[in-house]
Image (cartoon, rainbow, N blue to C red):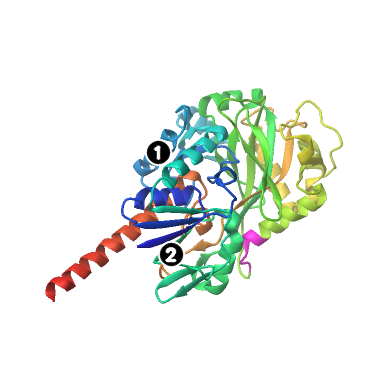
Amino acid sequence: MKIGIIGFGASSIGFVERIKEIAPEIHIFEKSKDIFSSSISGIRADGKLFVSRDMGGDLDLDLELQKKLVDFYISKTEEKKYETGSSFQKKEYYNKFYEKGFQPVVSDFYHIGTDQLKEVLLNIYKEYSSNPAIHFHFNHPVQEIAIKANKVIIDQEFAFDQVIVSVGRSGHNLVKKIITRFPEVITDNTKVDLGIRYELPDHIVADLNQEMYEFKVRYKSRTGYMVRTFCNNPSGYVVTEHYEDFVTVNGHSKIKEKSNNTNFAVLTTIQLTQPFNDPIGYGSYIAKLSNILAGKDKVILQTYANFKSSKRTKNLYRVQPTLPENQYILGDINLAFPRRIIESIIDFIENLKSVIPGIANDDNLVYAPEVKFYSNRLCNQKIPHLYFSGDCSGHTRSIIYATAHGWQTAEELIHQYENDRSGSNKKNSRQ
């Protein structure tokens, strides 16, 4: 069984880890020029590993498998250091948020940090590249996939028995080419998360950070949109995230280096109906519009007071950004975002201040755009020998869920391989 994998990230790692003992030949195609410019999904964001049934994707994943994969990643760090905690395990905090209309999300987390996550990827690569059955092809962005005579052909050159597309959300151009040719694989393509990155002093959320590190809540805003927090980073840093033709904002925190600010995303989930069929295109368009206002490779920064009143920010006050000055421009996010999304975010933060005093201070910082792409939700039973795994499949949106999806995909292939071999043995025995 000759296997091709497109993309070297979380889901492909889960796939390889499960199938490496039985696959005689595995080829991994990665568009990055080398391992140092490649990334596990989330590497630029933070390196949090969650164990939960309520977040990370729509797959039914055993909690023991999730914890097993967490331990796998931790084992690949140099110093085995990590921070851990539980979100809303105590009823006191759960009830406090619930009474104000919020839906708390329960989960356990293990934070290994952006700095250590780089070590993880490098150590996994070293282990895999020393395996004679595993071959890496860096600086190879796949352009074309075709199905011929029960083989999957990559770029009219490489033929495989099975191919796993594991390109994450940043590989949406390749996925779009595939689904244009095979539209039957799409089961849902109506959802995208659009919002902002919020930054404030640590002391405002010190109790929450100490209690659970990562607080995750959802809230049904008065606009009808569901709004949620995402990727809370105590003493963390705001960063920019570069896609192929636009720039968004994100956040991360490190194990060894700390700031004086906490940042987290406030995301509005937009679920549209027919004839809408391009969530990535919609989110990308909003991001590009924001980039036009901010300038090349920059995002928009605004105080919360100006964000509420639709005024351009010209000066900051007490809260100073952790994002370097050459990566943002003081501006007005209202010129780029649809008003209903702005109103949803404001409604969320204004209600949150009843639970967290100071969360809506005028000089807290708002960055945009932050976009989380769900991708089209794809079915793996429509194209023989071709599978979509991880975030590009539309079924996952976290490191552990993506890794577990790769693991599950490998198990499906192993089961199929064993059945085929068993059937072949029975046929030979009858002859």
Amino acid on which the number 2 mark rests in the picture: Asn
x%, y% of residue 290? 76, 51
Q: Is residue 55 at least partly visible in the picture?
A: no
Q: Given the current orientation, which residue lies at the most extreme right position?
A: 314
Part of the protein shown in magenta: 276-281
For numbered disc 1, what is the local secondary structure?
helix
Q: Say whether residue 194 is left or right of residue 292.
A: left
Q: Residue 192 in magenta?
A: no
Number of dots carrying numbers: 2
- The correct choice, above or below, for 429 with respect to 96 in the image is below
Name the residue: 60% across, 32% down: 253
Say which residue label 1 marks: 72
Say which residue label 2 marks: 380
Neighbor class of circle 2 (other Cα within 10 Å; few <14, some 14-19, many 20+) is: some
Q: Residue 278 in magenta?
A: yes
Neighbor class of circle 1 (other Cα within 10 Å; few <14, some 14-19, many 20+) is: some
For numbered disc 2, what is the local secondary structure?
loop
Dot 1 or dot 2: first in sequence order is 1
Name the residue: 76% across, 29% down: 320
x%, y% of residue 233? 60, 33
